[in-house]
Amino acid sequence: GNSVTQMEGPVTLSEEAFLTINCTYTATGYPSLFWYVQYPGEGLQLLLKATKADDKGSNKGFEATYRKETTSFHLEKGSVQVSDSAVYFCALLSSGGSYIPTFGRGTSLIVHP
Amino acid sequence: GAGVSQSPRYKVAKRGQDVALRCDPISGHVSLFWYQQALGQGPEFLTYFQNEAQLDKSGLPSDRFFAERPEGSVSTLKIQRTQQEDSAVYLCASSLYQAGAFFGQGTRLTVV
């Protein structure tokens, strides 16, 4: 079956540091991949996506590249801000006809001033 | 509406009480999902609708959980005889095929 594995958190960084949150997946076929962000007390917001191998999704300074050879979709940002503190979820959508997204357990990011 | 709307935002239920959670998806979105999110965890799939058809309910934890979407738009998740382990945030999401799911703010259910 489909699954998503994310690095354990929390990830604690100082403002302007470089961020990487690792995500690997297991899926049949060629899934679409997503990153979502969840701020305290809120629902999940779609941050970026990639639908095929070597695609790069980007939004608000965050980037992730769909790597089929390593089945990975790591989230990166060159310079984090305090306002980026949130929980980040990696997700996949299988290409096999089921439109049900599968989520990882989430990685908490804490950015200190 | 502009986004997915869920109500109520917060619900406190006494153990044994029935509850109904409402989801109003983005207009025109064919797919609708319900997820359960425990504290500090990722969303766990409950059930999926395509228009009014419930195509997958494999994630519903027991027969106390029931979901419907009778006209292919608004959906209701009903939990009968609530128990403490039902306490969680219930998230609704909608999507247009594989474009990515858009989530509501969730309903936080606390069973006391």
Image: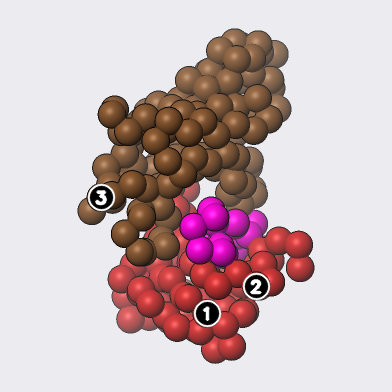
Image-quadrant location for residue A39: top right
On the image, the x and y values in percent for residue B26 come to 67, 67
- The first of marks 1 and 2 along the sequence is 2
For the question of whether residue B10 can be seen, the reply is no
Q: Chain of mark 2?
A: B
In the figure, A1 relative to B83: above or below?
above
Residue identified by numbered label 1: B51
Find chain B in the image and tell me its colour. Answer: red
Q: Quadrant of the N terminus of chain B?
A: bottom right
Q: Mark 2 Cα within 10 Å, few/some/many (few <14, many 20+)?
A: few
Q: Are marks 3 and 1 in contact (CB under 8 Å)?
A: no
Q: Which residue is depicted at the point 61% across and 80% down? A: B73
Chain painted in brown in the figure: A
Q: Mark 1 Cα within 10 Å, few/some/many (few <14, many 20+)?
A: some
At label 1, the amino acid type is Asn
At label 3, the amino acid type is Thr
Give the CA distance from mark 1 to mark 2. Answer: 9 Å
Q: Chain of mark 3?
A: A
Q: Which residue is depicted at the point 60% across and 40% down? A: A47
Secondary structure beneath dot 3 equals loop
Q: Which residues are magenta?
A: B89-111
In the figure, B39 relative to B25: above or below?
above
Image-quadrant location for residue A17: top right
**Closest to the observer: B17 or B42?**
B42
Residue identified by numbered label 3: A28
Q: Chain of mark 1?
A: B
In the figure, A79 relative to B106: above or below?
above
Specify whether A77 is left or right of B49.
right
